[in-house]
Image (cartoon, rainbow, N blue to C red):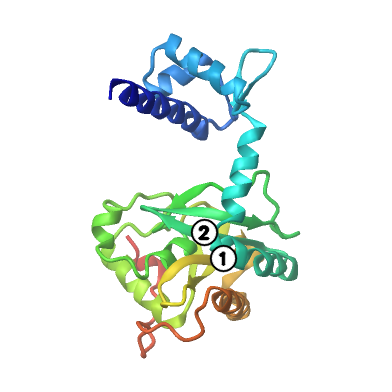
Amino acid sequence: MVTEAGTNQSVERAVAVLRAFGGSSAGTLRVTEVAHLTGLRQSTASRLLSTLEQAAFVERDADGQYRLGADLITLAGVAVNGHPVHHAARQPAQSLAAATGLGANVAVRRGREAFYLCNFEGRLAPRAFALTGRRNPLHATALGKCLLLDVDGRRELLGELERYTPRTITDHAVLDTVLGQVAWQGYSTETEELSLSRSCLAAPLRDRSGRVVAALSLSGPSSVVDLATREQELSRLVVETADAINSQLGHHGPADHQISAPIRRLDQRSRS
């Protein structure tokens, strides 16, 4: 039992070391930085990094800084390709990005965050980094609003709603009203609620039971997405693409919980 407990602790520490790189904007860390981020002794962090380097899970450059290793890409590819939502959504999302020139994204919910399974850049919405594997808050994204539709106890799940821009929804009552509108119209929108100059429009993805298991979005610069004039056009495209993906996931009918009367869209000034 002592050996088993020690082995588990070693694994947990190694995982903590790998996760430390997720918070590095540069993608590289020194041993001292890893030790600080994980709360481990420097000698322990150094020993774990050496072991992970031998396994090709981290790499060290000439300056002695570590980065995540290429073998993790192989494992990540296996994990992503084996996910049923990714399998069903990859080609339709890629085609949607090509047709619109916008970014097409697919995400699932992980706790109180949206986790990106895949992302395709459009010619009008280039990014300097890959979104796949990244996480964003549920309340401040169009994807997240779709992912919240079937969540019971969402106020307890989300807790205090963090503000990211002046347009972020930070009041639970307002968010509840917005989600009611999303449920009725079948898609969600987001204009500069997470970051300035970026807008998004998303639709829920459902499995054979009708449960929301993921969401599909179109995103890009606000000037290109231009929801003020393009919402009807883009919502039709994203909902149609979502319906095609839903069929692959086994869902062929309307959501049982959709309401039957329209809800007036909130004026942005009414948001807290």
For badge 1, the amino acid type reads Ser
| Residue 107 circle label | 2
In terms of secondary structure, where does tag 1 sit?
A: strand
Q: Residue at x 38, y 66 (%)?
A: 269
Q: Residue at x 37, y 84 (%)?
A: 256
Left/right of residue 261 with respect to residue 226 in the rendered view:
left
Residue 199 in the image: x percent, y percent? Answer: 56, 61
**Is 59 above or below relative to 263?**
above
Q: Quadrant location of residue 67?
A: top right
Q: Residue at x 30, y 69 (%)?
A: 176
**Which residue is at the far bottom?**
260
| Residue 166 circle label | none
In terms of secondary structure, where does tag 2 sit?
A: strand
**Is 253 above or below relative to 105?**
below
Q: Earlier in the sequence, mark 1 or mark 2?
A: 2
Viewer-proximal residue among 44 and 225:
44
| Residue 217 circle label | 1
Instruction: Classify 10 Å Cα crowding around label 2: few (below 14), some (14-19), many (20 and above).
Output: many
Viewer-proximal residue among 169 and 6:
6
Residues at circles 1 and 2 in contact by the CB criterion of under 8 Å = yes
**Is 222 above or below relative to 204?**
above
Q: Residue at x 51, y 84 (%)?
A: 252
Viewer-proximal residue among 158 and 51:
51
